[in-house]
Amino acid sequence: MKRTKKDAAARLLISLVPAFIFTNTLGVLLTLSLPGSKLTNLSYVITFAFLFYSVLVMWVFHTTHLKAALSGICIGILLCSGASYLLY
Amino acid sequence: MKSGIRDTMTWFHTWIGLVLCWVMYFMFVTGTTGYFDEEIDQYMMPEIAHHEQVSLESRFETLMNYGNQNALGAEQWFLTPEAFRGGMLSRIFYRLPQEEDPESLQNFNITMNPKTGESIEGTARETAGGQTLYRMHWRLHYINPDLAYYLIGVVTLFMFIGVVSGIVIHRKIFTDFFTFRNKSNGKGWLDAHNLMSVSSLPFQLMIAYSGLLFMVTTFLPVIGYASYGFDVGKTIDAAQSLRISYKVEASGRAADMLAPNDLMTSILEKVDRDDIKRINVKHPGDENAVIIVRPMESIYGARSAEGYVFSAVTGEYIETLPHALNAAMQINTVMLDLHEGLFAKTDLRWLYFVAGILGSGMIASGSIYYVRKRRVKLGPNAEMPRNLRNIESGNIAVTVGLMAGIAAFFIANRLLPVEMDNRADWEVHCMFIVWGLCFVHAFIRTNSQAWKEQCYFTSLLYLALPFINGMTIDQHLFNAINEGNWIFASTDLLSILFSLIFGAIAFQMGKKVTLSRPKMRTAPTRSAMVRDH
């Protein structure tokens, strides 16, 4: 398969910035919302956060519709941040 | 056009491999030496009779006596009965307030001869040792350690994804594993890559993911910080609570601690002597002084081991600290312990070493296959594009040149004057100078010449090491075997083995050059030689 350098650079950028922020915001949401103490939730989140992030990066490099993926990640960031704010 | 997951992952695997393989190879090779870091430390300090045996009781007594005489004001002591695995030396670490500024603490890290209780400072030569070599796998060298840490974090992430994507793209993983095509079309390199990847796959997955777990607080601090309302104090408290520790306050009343031999008797009632690697004494000389022993056994290392707590005043057993806070932290800490392998005895350490070499080979064969595949595609008469040639030159300098640099590091330890200023730094400089020269060489010679010459050069360096060792110190190979000094003997033997491997590769490459020479009627041009080999 062929991909342009621009396309590859865009995917790399999305992986390193929005996908990274999404991992963090989702992590905060899960720490605050999962049943169990905050400390217990935090321990689970930090242990498995990189697993989620890795899968997310793979998906960013796999998906055909890059703009839709970026929009999805941005909406995810907003929703997770908003929900975390309300939960805290 | 919509692509399947295997297509995109193949593309992804190829490109992250190409872009990051040289850094990953450096991390793997230097990290692999870390499984024998303390053995390398001993090899690089030949003035010490490391192979002499001292009992655990004597070591503990010497360390406790040293602490009692020099460090009673410290909040805690960290005792390492065997400072270098299997070796004679012992170590104590503590902090004391500085005389000029009592607010700040000064570190004391004393490595001593347990027979005499005297520090070895001034006895052994100054050396970078195995610690510097192994720390390079996450701190690199010559660049800011923080920058290196972030860089290594990103590389580790992509390495983990590279391993996972490698699994995705191999639909027939077992068929691939048992396939080897030793033909000139370059497929042999792919098969070698598959063979080395699959045979050490659990290790690769573990090492990459646990590498990420080391960096979780650096890369994902926001999760903890935001969850605790951006309160630094609460976040630090939470981070500390994630690790099991024994909390005890000093009473402020002085009390004599029990004699070391009696304390050790109490400890040995609960803990196997072979599993005692580190001992922590909290509030020494206080009525509430305790001793915490974390036995490293099975898969439990410094982070996930249970902690046995004893009163240092009465020797009484107090309690056992659990492995971890919960299942998640147990996974977390066991992964970190698996990465470090501190619990591993010699046989398991060799297995780690072999897995590390397979990992290095996996990266090297992948990068070589990238070039070979494209060269075959070009056809026999086409000229090799400049960028492809540069990639191959880089591959040569990194895969072979780094090994030459490491050999130079060991040789420098034996040849640099013992009294030299900044001797430890110069050992490392020698490594990078040789490696740098290998880069220059790889780019000024044709690729086939560079492969052959660098392999011969590396072979020569590894062959020279046991001889230089024999000429500069009395612990030459036969002497070391005779005295049962297996660290020195196995380092020399391993060096000879590496020499034979690189020599055999160089010889094979030389044969190929000789066989293909008659086809050339005129003096070969640079591009023609690259094409032919």
Image: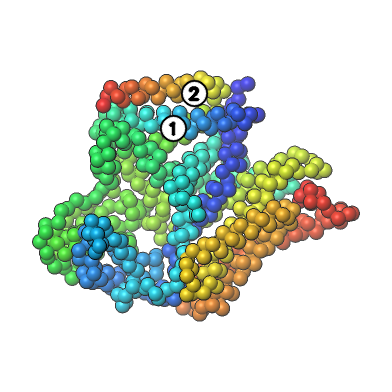
Q: Which of the two residues, B98 or B316, is positioned nearer the viewer here?
A: B98
Classify B317 as above or below B59: above
Q: Amino acid at mark 2?
A: Leu
- Percent position of residue B183, x then y: 73, 47
At a point 89% along the width and 54% down the height, the residue shown is B521
Q: Residue furthest left?
A: B253
Looking at the image, tell me whether mark 1 or mark 2 is earlier in sequence order. Answer: 1
- Percent position of residue B426, x then y: 52, 65
Indicate the chain on which mark 2 is placed: A
* Element carrying mark 1: helix
In the displayed structure image, the side of residue B370 where residue B203 appears, left or right: left
In the displayed structure image, the side of residue A39 where residue A50 appears, left or right: right
Is residue A83 in sight in this rendering? yes
Find residue B217 and report its image quarter: top left
Quadrant that contains the N terminus of chain B: top right
Contact flag, marks 1 and 2 (Cβ < 8 Å): no
- The numbered mark at residue A20 is 1
Q: Which of the two residues, B70 or A60, is positioned nearer the viewer here?
A: B70
- Percent position of residue B119, x then y: 33, 73
Q: Amino acid at mark 1?
A: Phe
Classify B179 as above or below B229: below
At a point 64% along the width and 58% down the height, the residue shown is B438
Which residue position is annotated with label 2?
A70
* Element carrying mark 2: helix
